[in-house]
Image (cartoon, grey):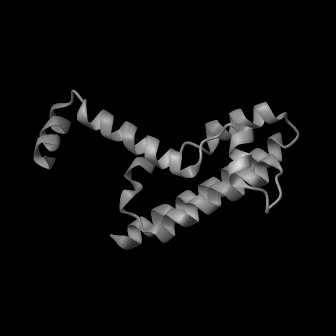
Amino acid sequence: MTRCLTIRMLCELRNLYVRSNILKRRFGYCSKAVKVMLFRSYCVNMYDIALWHSFTARTINRLRSCYHKCLKHFFGYSRHYSVCSMLLELNLPSFDTLLINSSAVFNQNWLTSDNALVRYLNVLRC
């Protein structure tokens, strides 16, 4: 089980780096507004992020670091620039905000689903 989770997270790390590098290469000379829209579309949406509560803090920190590095690289900030200032300037969500919001949306969809199987599993969970 742990090996499968580790492989999934490594794939997500690699995908985030690949997507941000592709965006940097193809759209590096675009305006900041266009870059923000592209980053939101391609890098903020992470696969099964709502289910990441079972990962270790070390793994989540690696993903957080990857997210910040990709942001700085794509938007041309220096390595030592403040992450909070950068996120405020770009009006992008922090990594922790992504985790919390996706978990909340997942739980809301899970609890309000009309699917009979999901309702049955929800009853078993409680």
The location of residue 42, given as percent across then percent down, is 63, 41
Q: Give the quadrant of residue 82.
A: bottom right
Q: Give the quadrant of residue 87.
A: top right
Tally of marks: 0
The answer to whether residue 38 is visible is: yes
Q: In this view, does 49 lie above or below 1?
A: above
Q: Give the quadrant of residue 121.
A: top left
Instruction: Give the residue at the far top of this rendering.
Output: 114
The location of residue 48, given as percent across then percent down, is 43, 48
75 relative position to 51: left or right: right
The answer to whether residue 46 is visible is: no
Give whichever of 13, 53 is nearer the camera: 53
Q: In this view, does 11 lie above or below 114?
A: below
The location of residue 105, given as percent across then percent down, is 39, 37
Determine the residue positioned at 13% across, 46% down.
126
Determine the residue positioned at 62% across, 54% down.
16
Determine the residue positioned at 51% across, 45% down.
98
The location of residue 29, given as percent across then percent down, is 88, 40
Instruction: Give the residue at the far right of this rendering.
Output: 29
Give whichever of 4, 36 is nearer the camera: 36
118 relative position to 55: left or right: left
In the rendered view of the protein, which quadrant contains the N terminus?
bottom left
Determine the residue positioned at 58% across, 59% down.
64
